[in-house]
Amino acid sequence: MTHPPTTVKPIRDLDAGSEAVPDEKLASDEDKHISEGEHNQEPQSDDSSDEDDSPSKTKRGPRGTYQKYTDQQWQDLLHTVTDGFGLISVSQACKDVGINPRTGSTAIRKHLEDPSAEFPPRKPRGRGSGRPPLLGPEQTVFIENFFGDAADANAEDLREAIEKEFGLKVSKQTLDRHIKKECQLVLKRLNTQPVAQDVSNMPEYRKAWVQNWSNQADFERKSVFIEETSYRLFVRRLYGHTPSRKKQAEAEGRIEDPSTIKVPKSKEIILPVVGAICWEGLLGLSLRTPLASTQEDRFIAVIKSVLDMLDKKNMTGMSIVIGNTTIHKSHSIEALISERGHIPIYMPPCSPSLNPIENFWAHVDRHFRGQERQEETTSSRLQEAGDAVPLDTIRTCITHARDRCLSVSASLETPSNKSK
């Protein structure tokens, strides 16, 4: 069996100052390389004679583990090479200090090319020479101001604001990463702090409302007051008759407190109630159970029932006084009242004491608490509590509300009049 001639490549010095290798050593290394090749070569069959002409391809072995060298090792390598320049090779110096020869040779070569550079040369950290970031300092300031004005805003609103302001479409991951790293903003649970409303102009507003209402002819008899409230189903009287301490001491073995009333442990049921009163008395109480319809639809149904009752009593041109709520001030409710020949009037904000129906609810609540209630009979018992309020009491509530309105109008004098 014949072997192809083996060509020995000259060994390249790692640096110009490396020691020349003697020819005898090169010859011995060549003989050793050839002998190892003959020993490791496997027998070939005659069929593979065509493949001898093609150069053989060697597969790269598995990559070794990453090694991290200390600064002391690098300093020892640099001193060994510079102090023994020309006496010891870089490869041998790397082996002496425990550094991979290829890694050490690269570092020494770069140091000889630029002695002022850092040794060993380190790879630059951070963003490389790729695509520049989509969000820059300008967007960072915009994001900080965006959440500074509204901390409860979500990321989707921020994405829409950035697209509208800068014309950039940012993914959720990119935006979240920029918020955390660049803006230094974190997601926390927000705490609410009640802030008082600005009611500086409320006295003047109430004065104008009272004067406009009192200028109408006989506004006591030509007004209908509609308001919504709520009752708890399992509420009981606050006071009751229980055994005295002396009688409790005589009763031996009593564990339960007699002043404790048992109520169902289930979730408390809140009953929304809408009522309407006028000078003629109670027009009706309506118990509204939660349905799929909106609150505005339920209130419109109440308004229709009140207007139908006014038509039965031939009461036209009435002033329908309604609370100042958003759902009460819709155009559909105003149009409904105006089409039936009545005038919609809205109470001023933060002025529940001017509405006489508030006192009426207090009387209904007193009768409602004193009754034994069940969920299926709540509507009838609520109607009974409303009917139990006398007509004179309702008229007294309206009269007192009129007096309060007039007193408010009289008290809201200008500073010059007050000084006189």
Image (spheres, grey):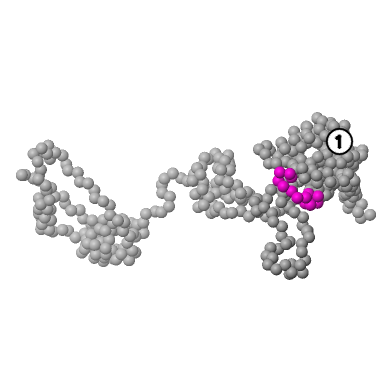
Q: Taking 417 as reference, is 323 left or right?
A: left
Q: Which residue is mark 1?
A: 318
Relative height, residue 281 to residue 39 (above, below) = above
Residue 413 seen? no
Count of marks overlaid on the render? 1
Asked whether residue 384 is in view, the answer is yes
Main SS, magenta region, reads helix
Depth check, front residue: 103 or 197: 197
The residue range painted magenta reads 365-378
Residue at 83% across, 44% down: 387
Q: Residue at x 79, y 52 (%)?
A: 370
Q: Is residue 93 magenta?
A: no
Q: Quadrant of the C terminus?
A: bottom right
Q: Residue furthest right?
A: 420
Say few, some or many: other residues with alpha carbon within 10 Å of mark 1 (under 14 / 14 to 19 / 20 or more): many
Q: Position of residue 169 (x, y in %)?
A: 52, 40
